[in-house]
Amino acid sequence: MFEQLRQAVNAITPMSDDDWDIFEPLLQLKSIKKNDFFLKMDEVERYIGFVNKGSFRWYYINGKGEEVNYHFFFDNDFVVGFDSFITQKPSRLFIQAMEDTELVLLPERSKILEFYSKSHTWEHFGRLISEGVYAQTAARVHDFLFNSAEERYLSLLKQHPNIFQRVSLSNIASYLGVQGPSLSRIRKRISKS
């Protein structure tokens, strides 16, 4: 039932049957319909999800009232408002399903912390997840500081070659920090070269 998640966990750090067996009974399957939320602004994040099938966008609302996409989550990704999960303070961002999505909810935060104290393997897993989130955040900041919109577009395509089949052009433009017409011009330039 949770084999897809177990494979993803083992890809991060090998997990013994004993370590998995204390964890698996606390897992929950959950379905989220397109446009429904995994996390809303001002909620405190208590769970980490694993996307079996589907997608989410992580966004905030800027001072002009516009939605600005910060990150996308797809199949086999862990989805979490990590800053809120760590600090247990209300989130300033939203996580919304872009399509009907099936995910596995990992145990609530307090249980995760218990696993860290009981199992070196789970503690190691948590550290590697944290390092991965940090690396993604640093890469995102780097993109906006040092890369042009076209370079950000090419990087997104390299990471997610099928993104245009799953994400609207307006959401992609927002993620890249450009308006829709600019994204169209970038796409035309790239297709000609």
Image (tube, rainbow, N blue to C red):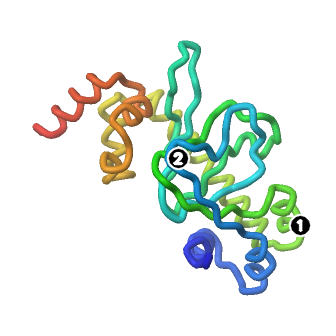
Residue 131 relative to residue 109: left or right:
left
Q: Residue at x 48, y 52 (%)?
A: 55
- Say which of 191 and 26 sits in front: 26
Q: Residue at x 61, y 52 (%)?
A: 79
Q: Secondary structure at mark 2?
A: strand
Residue 79 relative to residue 117: left or right:
left
Residue 105 relative to residue 102: left or right:
right
Q: Residues within 10 Å of mark 1 (few under 14, many from 20)?
A: few
Say which quarter of the image contains residue 175.
top left
Residue 56: give x, y in percent of width and height: 52, 47
Q: Amino acid at mark 1?
A: Ser
Image quarter in which the N terminus is found: bottom right
Q: Residue at x 58, y 78 (%)?
A: 3
What residue would you read off at disc 2? 97
- Say which of 95 and 112 sits in front: 95
Mark nearest the camera among 1 and 2 is 2
Q: Residue at x 42, y 29 (%)?
A: 174
Q: In the displayed structure, would residue 75 be above or below residue 56?
A: below
Residue furthest left as drawn: 192
Q: Amino acid at mark 2?
A: Ala
Q: Secondary structure at mark 1?
A: helix
Residue 4: give x, y in percent of width and height: 55, 74
Q: In the displayed structure, would residue 2 be above or below residue 128?
A: below
Q: Which mark identifies residue 117?
A: 1
Image quarter in which the C terminus is found: top left
